[in-house]
Structure formats: C-alpha cells, structure tokens
Image: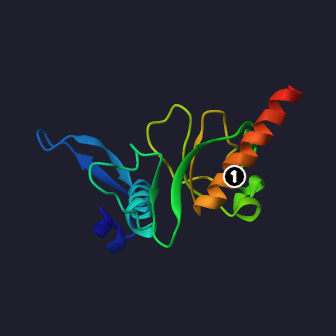
Amino acid sequence: CMDHFLLSEDDELPVVDARDGRLAGVVSRRDVLQVYSSELLRHEFLGLTVEGDHTPARRGSVRVTQGLTLARVKTPPPLVGRSLREANLRASHRVTVVAIRHAGEAEDRLPDPDRPLAPGDVLVMVGTAADLAAFRQQAGNEAAQWRESK
C-alpha cells in the first residue's frame, strides 16, 4: 500500500476478496499513514528497548534512549475536559504525551492536541523519571483538591 500511495496520486485502494474477486472494502492513504506513524513512533522514534518477554503493553514503563522513560498515566481529574494543547504539559511539567488510549478503546493512538481529555483516558508520556514522578505527585495533589471542592 505504501509503495502504491507513494507512486500515485490515489487516496484510496480497493481491497478485493481473493476467493471470489468481490470488493471487500477500501484502504485509505490516511489509514495507512496512521498505522505507519504509530508503529514508527512506537519502535523507532522513541528507541524503545524491550528486554525478555516484557512488552510495553505489559509493563508500566519502559526505558527509552537518552535517560528518558515512557510511562502510562491515567488522566488526572483536573485535566478532564481540557485538551493537551490547553494543558501544555511540556511547558508546565517537562513531559510529552506521545500517544493516548481513550476510555473504551483497545489501542493507543496518536494524540489529537485539541480533543478534550475524558475520564479513563490513559496518557502515554515521555520524560525523565524525575519529571514524570513530579507530574504524578502534582496530579495526585490536584486530584485530591479537586475531590474536596466537589
């Protein structure tokens, strides 16, 4: 698919059932690029190192290159309803959200910076261990204050 899209101006490719030659569906350029980007981010850009049988899905965090850590963090209540752009976690906490698993979904997705965060969303964040710990600590404190105000 990638080769075809790179060499053509087509935005969609038909998917044909090999058994009877009937049209089974369509694959779009956007679909292919989204899958490619997710895999590239997951395996190459972040430089993930996975040891033994452990996979990122089974571990709370994995070590990435240059002293960074990849961690999964539930969206703290004070961030619910705010977008990643509004939260500006990179400036306020020196952490970056590289993927998100929305509540009820089975897979991580590239984050939409303008989509409001919802309860149950899990943020896949990159930062130093100290910055991630500080974010978790502050998020916990803000969550406690938020609960008290309700």
Say whether residue 17 is left or right of residue 60: left
User: Dot 1: what SS?
Assistant: helix
Residue farthest to the top?
A: 150
Q: Is residue 29 above or below residue 142?
A: below
Quadrant of the frame with the N terminus? bottom left
Q: How many marks?
A: 1
Q: Which residue is mark 1?
A: 135
- Identify the residue shown where x is 32% and y is 65%: 2
- Kindly identify the amino acid type of the residue bearing the numbered disc 1: Phe
Q: How is the image coloured?
A: rainbow
- Which class describes the residues within 10 Å of circle 1: few (<14), some (14-19), or many (20+)? some
Relative to the observer, which residue lies in front, 128 or 74?
Answer: 128
User: Whole-percent x and y of residue 95?
Assistant: 65, 60
Say whether residue 90 is left or right of residue 56: right
Relative to the observer, which residue lies in front, 42 or 147?
Answer: 147
Q: Is residue 127 visible?
A: no
Q: Is residue 143 above or below residue 14?
A: above
Q: Is residue 72 visible?
A: yes
- Identify the residue shown where x is 34% and y is 47%: 26
User: Whole-percent x and y of residue 101?
Assistant: 53, 42
- Identify the residue shown where x is 63% and y is 55%: 132
User: Whole-percent x and y of residue 48?
Assistant: 40, 63
User: Whole-percent x and y of residue 122?
Assistant: 57, 42
Quadrant of the frame with the C terminus? top right
Residue farthest to the left?
A: 19
Relative to the observer, which residue lies in front, 59 or 91?
Answer: 59
- Identify the residue shown where x is 42% and y is 61%: 33
